[in-house]
Amino acid sequence: MGGHFTFSHLEFLGRGALWTVLLSALGFLGGGVLAFLVALCRISGARIVRVGSGVIVQLVQGTPLLVILFLSYFGLPAIGVPVPPLLAAGASLTLYIGVYLGETWRAAIEAVPRAQWEAAECLALSRVQRMFRVILPQAVHIATPPTVGFMVQIIKSTSLASAIGFVELARSGQIINNSLLEPFPIFVLIAATYFAICYPLSRLSRRLEARSGFAPVEGGAP
Amino acid sequence: MSEPVVILRDVHKSFGPLHVLNGVSFAVAPGTVTAIIGRSGSGKSTALRCIDRLECIDAGEIVVCGHLVSDTGLALRKLRLDVGMVFQSYNLFPHLTVLQNITLAPRMVKRLGRAEAEELAERVLGQVGLADKAHAWPEQLSGGQQQRAAIARSLAMEPKVMLFDEVTSALDPELTGEVLRVIEDLARRGMTMVMVTHEMGFARRVADQIVFMHEGRAWEIGPPDILAAPATPDLRQFVGSVL
Amino acid sequence: MGITLDFGAVLARWPMLLDGAWMTLELAAVATLLGFAIGVVCAVGRRGAVHWVARICGVYIELVRNTPFLVQIFLVYFGLSSLGLSLPAVTVAIAALCINVGAYSAEIVRAGLDSVARGQVEAGETLGLSRLQVYRYVIFPPAVERVWPALTSQFVLLMLASSVCSQISAEELTAAANFIQSDTYRAFETYIIVAVMYVVLSLLLRAAFWALGQVLFVRRRCLGTAI
C-alpha cells in the first residue's frame, strides 16, 4: 500500500497552501480593480454603459467558474492564443471575482443614503469630487464586512484551479494521495487547512457585519 | 357572589435584577370589566401577560377560569381556549386574509370544518363592523380596522375572558374611537375583560373596577369613583398628571 | 493569421449536450429539495432550546461554509468508498450537493425565521395553537416568502456548482463539454456554447422560482408588495 505521511509531504502541502494564498491574493487584487470598474459602470449615468455592464455581469454570474477556467486554459490555446496555467487561473479568477465583488460594491454604493448625494451636490462639488470625497468613503465602510466575507469565497474558489493542473492546496492533496493511497485522511487534512484559513475571516466578517448592520444577499458560492 | 374568573394573589415577577411585580393581588368577577392603569414601568402589561402565561411568574398564584396558571404542568391549550388576548400592535398574520386570520385557530385548534369556521368568522366580523373586509389583506386596512380584526380573531375562539394590552396606544387618535366602541359593545354583552389602558375617560365610563398599579403592586383598587376621589396621594398625582 | 471558429462541429453533438444539461437540472432539482429540507431542519435546530442540537447544526454549517465544495465532494466520494460503499457518481454528487446547500440554506432560512416578530408568535400562542402549528402557520410562511430571493440565488448557485461534480465523473454538462472538446478539438467553441447553456439554465431556474413564488405566496400575487 502507500507509504507514510512524512515531513516532505507536509512541506508539499505547505507549498500548495502558499499557492492557494498567492492565487487568492492575485484574484483579490485583479478582481478588486475589475470590481471597482464594474461597480462604477453599473451606476453610470449613461444607460448603455449601465445596461451593457449589466449584461456582462449576468453572463459571467450565469457561468460556473470551472467552465470559465476551462475556457481560458483549453479554449484559448485551441484558437491559437497561448495561455500558461497561472495566467489562465489568474484571469479566470479575476473575471469571476471582479463581477461578484463589483455587484457587492455597487450595492454598497447604492446603500449610501440619497441625502448624502444631495448634500454633496449642494456643496457644489463636481461629480468626480462627490464620488471620491463623499460617497466612496461611506461605501467602503458599508462594503467592508461583505468584502471580508467574500475573501472566504475567493480562497475556496482557488481550489478549482486544481482542475487545470495548478498545484495549489487541493491538487497537492490529490498528488499526495496518488502515492499514499489514503484519500480520506488526506482530504480531511486538506479540508482542515482550508478551514483554518477561512474560518477566522468568516468570524471577522460577521463581527464587522454586526457592527455596521449591512448584510446583502446571504448567498454563498461553494 | 359567583367565583372570580381571574384571581391574582401576591404575584412576583422579576426580569433579571428588575423587580417588575412586587406582590400584585386583585380579582375579576365574571361579566365585569377591570381597567388596569398606571405609569409606564408600573408593571401593568407584565401583570396582564402573566395572566395568559406569556410570562412566567416567580412567586404567588394566578388562577384563571379554574386553571392554575402558575402550574408548570398546566396544559397551555386549555388555558388559551378560555383566554383571548388582543395586543397593542394587533399582530395580524400578514400572509393571511382577514377571514383566514380569524378561521385559522377555530379550524386548527377546535377542529371546526371550513364552512363552519367561515360562518363563525363572518359573524364576529359583523360584530366588529368589518363584514365587508373579510377578503382584505391586513396591510390594506387602517390601524383601527386591523385592531378590530384582531379583536374579532380572539372573539372567534369564544373565550371566557378577554385581555386587552393597550390596544389603542398605537393608533392615530381619530381611529381609537371605533376600537373603543367595539370594546364597549363587548362589555355590554357581558364579556369578562381585563384591559391595560391609558384611556381614562373610557375606563371611568366602562370599567366596573379600576386597578391602579404603582411600584409593581395593585396600589389602589376600586370602582371608577376612585379616579375622582383617590385615596392615595400616588393615584391623586397620577390622575392629576393624566387628566 | 485568422482564427477559424467551427461551432457546427460542437452543435452537432447536441444530444450529448442536452443529456448533460438534463443531468445538471436533475442534480440541481434533487439537491434543491433535499438540501432545503436539511436547511429547514438545521435552522429550526439552531433556534431550538435543545443545546447540543443547536451546537451540532452550528458546527456543520461552519464546516461546510469554510471549505471548498471540491474538497467536500472528494471527502464524500472517498469517505463513502472507504466505508465499502460503491455508489454511482450521480448519487455521490447529489449527496455532496445536499450537504453543501443544506448548510447555506440553513442560514438563509434561519434569517427568515428570525425575521418573524415575537408578537406574531405570541398572537398564535394565545389563540391556542400548538408549538408545531405556530411554526407551520404563523412563522414558516412569511419567513420563506421573505427569504425567497435569497433562496432563489442560492439554488441557482447550486446549479452552477454542480459543474464541479464533473471532477468525480458525474455526467453533467461540464463533463459533457470536456468529452466533446477532447473529441472535436474545438475547446473554445465547446466551452462558449456550454457557458451560454449554463446562462440559459440560470435564467430558466430563476423564472421557475419566480413562478413558484407566485403560486405559493398568494398575498404577493394579489398585492405585489414585499411582506
Image (cartoon, coloured by chain):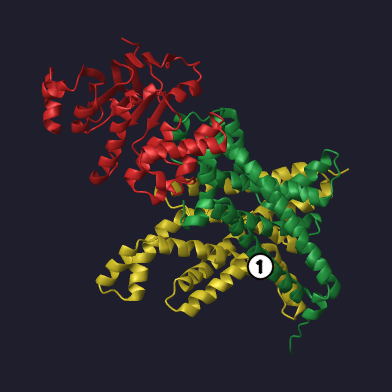
Chain colours: A yellow, B red, C green
* Quarter in which the N terminus of chain C is drawn: bottom right
Helix, strand, or loop for circle 1?
Answer: helix
Q: Which residue is mark 1?
A: C199
Q: Is residue A195 visible?
A: no
Residue at 64% across, 46% down: C36
Looking at the image, is C191 positioned above or below residue B57?
A: below
Looking at the image, is B146 positioned above or below residue C226?
A: above
Left of B149 or right of it: where is C167? right
Q: Is residue A60 visible?
A: yes
Task: Categorize mark 1 by other alpha carbons within 10 Å: few (<14), some (14-19), many (20+).
Answer: many
Left of C31 or right of it: where is B200? left
Left of A46 or right of it: where is C80? right
Q: Nearer the viewer, residue C86 or B188?
A: B188
Looking at the image, is B153 positioned above or below residue C35?
A: above
- What chain does mark 1 sit on? C
What x and y, as percent, mark residue A12?
Answer: 72, 52
What x and y, as percent, mark residue C56?
Answer: 61, 34
Residue at 50% across, 33% down: B105
What x and y, as percent, mark residue C41?
Answer: 62, 38
Q: Nearer the viewer, residue C205 or B203?
A: B203
Residue at 34% across, 64% down: A114
Left of B106 or right of it: where is B217? left
Q: Amino acid at mark 1?
A: Val
Residue at 47% across, 40% down: B101
Q: Nearer the viewer, residue B228 or C38?
A: B228
Q: Quadrant of residue A110?
A: bottom left
Q: Nearer the viewer, residue B242 or B143?
A: B143
